[in-house]
Amino acid sequence: QKEVEQDPGPLSVPEGAIVSLNCTYSNSAFQYFMWYRQYSRKGPELLMYTYSSGNKEDGRFTAQVDKSSKYISLFIRDSQPSDSATYLCAMSEGDLQGGKLIFGQGTELSVKP
Amino acid sequence: ETGVTQSPTHLIKTRGQQVTLRCSSQSGHNTVSWYQQALGQGPQFIFQYYREEENGRGNFPPRFSGLQFPNYSSELNVNALELDDSALYLCASSLPQSGVLGYTFGSGTRLTVV
């Protein structure tokens, strides 16, 4: 079993839709929970992060962490064609592990105009 | 210069050959991490360098090795290439105090092994 599981999609939605992306994990020592966005032929860029449990909102994006269920989510409201990319969840125990990130498989999202 | 620069952008090698990939860190960043991203997969941690010393390694065989130079640039070397080594290789630089939240990724080197 992988430490981090993410539905690879692909996911296709119409412009304006609400998108829900999810990951599950098995390592209870994870403290940092991140979402990266990766455009084609580019490296991942950090979109949002949460330390420990809880919710975080940034504009159209909301990240949720449920440590009791080992489940994290990213919601995108009013999705735009420019949101079309691969979304990667990533987790880390923190700096004691040398800053290692464990990534999910990535979900390819396409937002149609 | 800002951002992380990787070279070359694309590379084709034959099975059994050796390859060196290069990374220039973002200005001021003294920690470099390397990741392998196979097609359709998330990146996998190879190793990290801090002040020219290896500072953590993932589940990769010894034929994957690295170097970090005094100017914080870095190299990833892979010996005895296998077909499964075909992937996008990503370099990320950071400052130790920013930890996992401070990664800046380069655009990667696409390696194809034939």
Image (cartoon, rainbow, N blue to C red):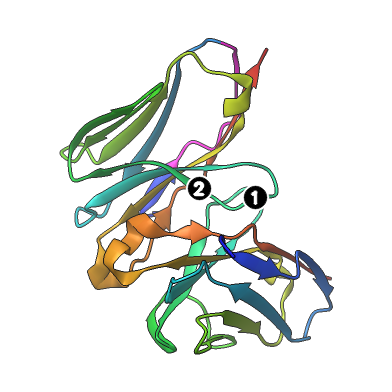
Q: In this view, does B14 lie to the left or right of B82?
A: right
Question: Which quarter of the picture shows residue B5?
Answer: bottom right
Spatial CA distance of label 2 from label 1 is 9 Å
Mark 1 crowd level (few <14, some 14–19, many ≥20, 10 Å Cα): some
Q: Which mark is residue A45?
A: 2
Q: In which quarter of the image is the C terminus of chain A?
A: top right
Quarter of the view holding residue A109: top right
Q: What residue type is labelled 1?
A: Lys
Is B18 left, or right, of A53 in this rendering? right
Q: Is residue B32 above or below residue A110?
A: below
Type of the residue with mark 2: Glu
**Do residues under tags 2 and 1 come within 8 Å of each other at their CB atoms?**
yes
Q: What stretch is highlighted in magenta?
A: A6-15
Label 2, secondary structure: give it. strand
**Residue B36 lies in the magenta stretch:** no
Q: Residue at x 48, y 58 (%)?
A: B104
Residue at image position (50%, 81%) is B72
Of A14 and B79, which appears nearest the observer? Answer: A14
Q: Which of A93 and B84 is in front in this view?
A: A93
Q: In this view, does A109 lie above or below B72?
A: above
Task: Give the chain of mark 2.
Answer: A
In x, y percent, where is residue B112?
Answer: 78, 66
**Does the magenta-highlighted stretch encompass residue A12?**
yes
At horizontal 38% and vertical 30% (from top left) the residue drawn is: A74
Which x, y percent locates residue B45? Answer: 46, 67
Q: Where is residue A82 in the image (x, y as percent from the top left)?
A: 61, 26
- Between residues B60 and B75, which one lies in front from this camera angle? B75
Q: Which mark is residue A42?
A: 1
